[in-house]
Amino acid sequence: MDFEILEILPIPVIRSAAPFQEGEEIFEMPRWHCFCCHDTGWVQPHIASLVIADYNPSRHRTPVCQACDKGRLWFHLKGNIDMRFNFRICKRLDKWERDNWKKTVMLQLENFQKRK
């Protein structure tokens, strides 16, 4: 079937890039409250490896976060989860991850400012 294009329509702009305003936050903290589990109830694997030597999420049971109330969502999986992380350990991991996140954001901001 042969047809002729009658008109080429412009591509509509769905979201135009807003100009950067001085003092505007370009890097934000995440929306989750618990940095240990990122509000999932599961301790993040890269954090769990700080506590469990040679931690491999494919082989080891998944640690449940005790720092927030999200860990209770997984208690029904008893036998398949690692309950050795207590409140104190999870709070320390939370603090470590918060500090790590802040350092990362600061490095990204410095790199962004260098490129300006």
Image (cartoon, grey):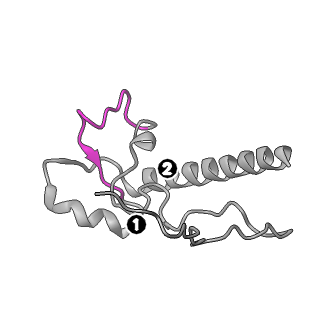
Q: Is disc 2 placed on a helix, strand or loop?
A: helix
Is 63 magenta? The answer is yes
Q: Position of residue 24 (x, y in %)?
A: 78, 69
- Residue 45 occupies quadrant: top left
Q: Position of residue 70 (x, y in %)?
A: 33, 66
Q: Are marks 1 and 2 in contact (CB under 8 Å)?
A: no
Q: Residue at x 14, y 54 (%)?
A: 78
Q: Residue at x 83, y 49 (%)?
A: 113
Query: Which numbered disc, 1 or 2, marks the residue that appears first in the sequence?
Result: 1
Quick check: 20 left or right of 54? right
Q: Residue at x 14, y 62 (%)?
A: 76
- Front residue of 37/15: it is 15
Give residue 15's mark.
none
Amino acid type of the residue that numbered disc 1 sits on in the rendered structure: Cys
Q: Is residue 48 positioned above or below 74 on the image?
A: above
Query: Is most of the magenta stretch helix, strand or loop?
Result: loop
Is 76 magenta? The answer is no
- Front residue of 46/22: it is 22
Q: Position of residue 56 (x, y in %)?
A: 31, 32
Amino acid type of the residue that numbered disc 2 sits on in the rendered structure: Leu
Disc 1 marks which residue?
Answer: 68
- Front residue of 14/28: it is 14
Q: What residue span does the magenta drawing correspond to?
A: 51-65
Quick check: 48 left or right of 18? left
Q: Tag 2: Cα neighbours inside 10 Å, few (<14), some, or many (≥20)?
A: many
Q: How many marks?
A: 2
Q: Is residue 51 positioned above or below 34 on the image?
A: above
Q: Is disc 1 placed on a helix, strand or loop?
A: loop
Q: Is residue 37 positioned above or below 23 on the image?
A: above
Disc 2 marks which residue?
Answer: 93
Q: CA distance from mark 1 to mark 2?
A: 12 Å
Q: Is residue 20 positioned above or below 58 on the image?
A: below
